[in-house]
Image: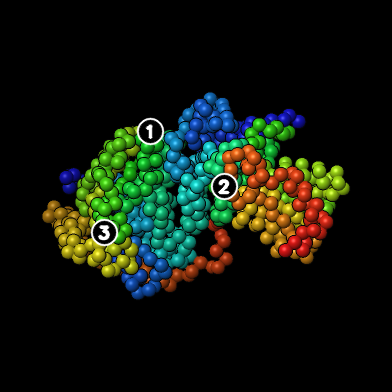
Amino acid sequence: MREITLSQAVNEAIAEEMRRDPTTFLIGEDVAEAGTPFKVLAGLADEFGTERVIDTPIAEPGFMGIAVGAALTGSRPIVDLMFGDFIYLIMDQLCNQAAKAYYMSGGKLNVPLVLRTNLGATRRSAAQHSQSLHALVAHIPGLKVAMPSSAYEAKGLMKTAIRDNNPVVIFEDKLMYNDKAPVPEEEYLIPFGEAHVKREGTDITLIATSSMVQVCEAAAEMLAAEGISAEVIDPRTIVPLDEATLIASAKKTSRVIVVDEGHQSYGITGEIAGRINEKAFYHLDAPVLRMGAMDVPVPFSPALEDITVPTPEGVAENARKLMSGEMIHAA
Amino acid sequence: MADTKTNTEDYMRMYRQMVRIRVFEDNANQLYLSAKMPGLTHMYSGEEAVAVGICEALTDDDRITSTHRGHGHCVAKGADYKQMFCELLGKEEGYCRGKGGSMHIADQSHGNLGANAIVGGSMGIATGSALSSKLQGSDDVTVCFFGDGATAQGLLYEVMNMAALWHLPVIYACENNGYSEYTKTEEIAAGSITARAEAFGIEAFTVDGQDVLAVNDLTQKLVARARKGEGPFFVELLTYRYHGHHVGDINRAYYREKEEETIWKESRDPIVNFGKWLSEEGIASAEDLKTMEDEIRAEAKQAVDYALAAKYPDESEVDMHVFAPTDPATLRPGA
């Protein structure tokens, strides 16, 4: 199978969907001729024109609000938010307007909108261009949240997002834009709420999102060399969450680490760990472990930044501790 | 003044719509005072000529966005009393099945994209609705209602900038009722309100918001121009809010003199003054108008009684409408 980059995969997905549905359009800062700073959207303005690939002023709440209004009136906007960190700027339009319109109107108005943005530290971009803020939006009823872990997922999830009748937020890992993965030539979509078992295992389950999937796959390799069989599961969407697959794996292996690049406190790792505790408690041989980013603003210095996020070594070390029973009585 | 002979029907409809708003609000206030309505509500009384003058220049395909003080816009855009009262009381037959309440009534069948409880929250939505018109090649116009208080929100300036750059068919209708919640507008708005829009090259107008014909005349012209791609426009409508910020804001002498309220009610009332004009012009007698009002009051009473007796939504509806369904067939390759 051919291999393409995550960036190309996103570009292909959007191009295919814009060809399929004339009501779709792209809107955001420097999306047209510039094709975004990461060049993810390069060439789309050539094909679809600047009528449908719309450059905006630097006004995130404004263009987000405009997208919500367009979505309420028969259009299907794909909003480009240059950095995930800017999500704070659009919170009212995203969480008070887009997320609630269908519910508040008793099912009369809906907002078919995709917000594509990014996450991920270790790019030496400091505290305002490195955050992984998906937990903020996953907390809000009415928003779906997709977290592609490779080019394959990026394409399939984007296509589903564009066809979904709700606001969907997609967080791409900005460090993975140039990473290649096998992506079929023929059309495919990845349904929301279906986790993917990336690697089967029997001793311990590593549940990982987005950037952390490859971290956990590397950790699983290390563990395999030591005779520990780790299962790696990528939920792919955190809203909706494929709880059944996660619970089944937890019951099978009896040990779970949840790894995510958002801050550890009050985050995705705690949510998933909580659900496993509630639904697989008697099957567990060890506490479910959370591994998120440190609860500090992302520092600039490489010497500091690199220790704020989970690494394969760190995941493997915790897995060994869970396997040896060391953590059971840690409290 | 427009031609009185050919426009009789329009005038009578405008009068009727203004009375419908006033009567709706009188009933909503009573529901609050008699503790029959859950929560609070914000009265539109006094501002009727604004909503009616504007909405009478629109078709059902033209859209509006509304505010927390939104009953007037809703009625003026064609909404039905029964469904509105049911919504105010949280009943299943309400416009939003009781999930929205007073501050979130949406009536898409008449182009009302909904009231908004965030001050200034719908400015983006209205502008996006206008972008849809442009992208879809339709000549529908969107009117964004907001108050003077909302001019303090930054979102307005972001979206006016884009609307002006892209020549969108949107009319920003600033209902300046003199008060930003519990504060005089002059204390929250520096400089001129219309100059804010003019800075973006948007043509801006100020109109007497108590004069329904003046409002309607201006809006008709602007809507016609917006349909031809000459938008956006900005209109400041000078008006007055008879009640407090909300129905519970009774003792308001600390920010507003009773005398001021009396002057507006006694000399500037949009319904009374328009009614007088209709009589002077021989279009309708005072008696005709009284009969019309009585009919409307009877209809309102019936709607209120209906809503009071109507069912609440079943508890099973609580987690309904969080997400809109997506037809699985559309998610297949090749679909």
Task: Give left or right: position of A139 versus A58.
Answer: right
- Choose top left, top right, bottom left or bottom right for residue B137: top left
How many residues crowd mark 1 within 10 Å: few (<14), some (14–19), many (20+)? Answer: some
Outermost residue toward the top in this view? A46
C-alpha span from label 2 to label 1: 37 Å
Q: Amino acid at mark 3?
A: Arg
Q: Exactly how many numbered labels are in the figure?
A: 3
Identify which residue is drawn at 59% across, 49% down. Answer: A296
Q: With respect to residue A286, does A216 lie above or below?
A: above
Which residue is painted at 31% across and 66% down in the image?
B249
Q: Are marks 3 and 1 on the same chain?
A: yes
Q: Quadrant of the N terminus of chain A?
A: top right
- Alpha carbon distance from label 3 to label 1: 34 Å
Location of residue B67 (image quadrant): bottom left
Q: For residue B165, which numbered disc appears in the image?
A: 1
| Residue annotated with mark 2 | A297
Disc 2 chain ID:
A
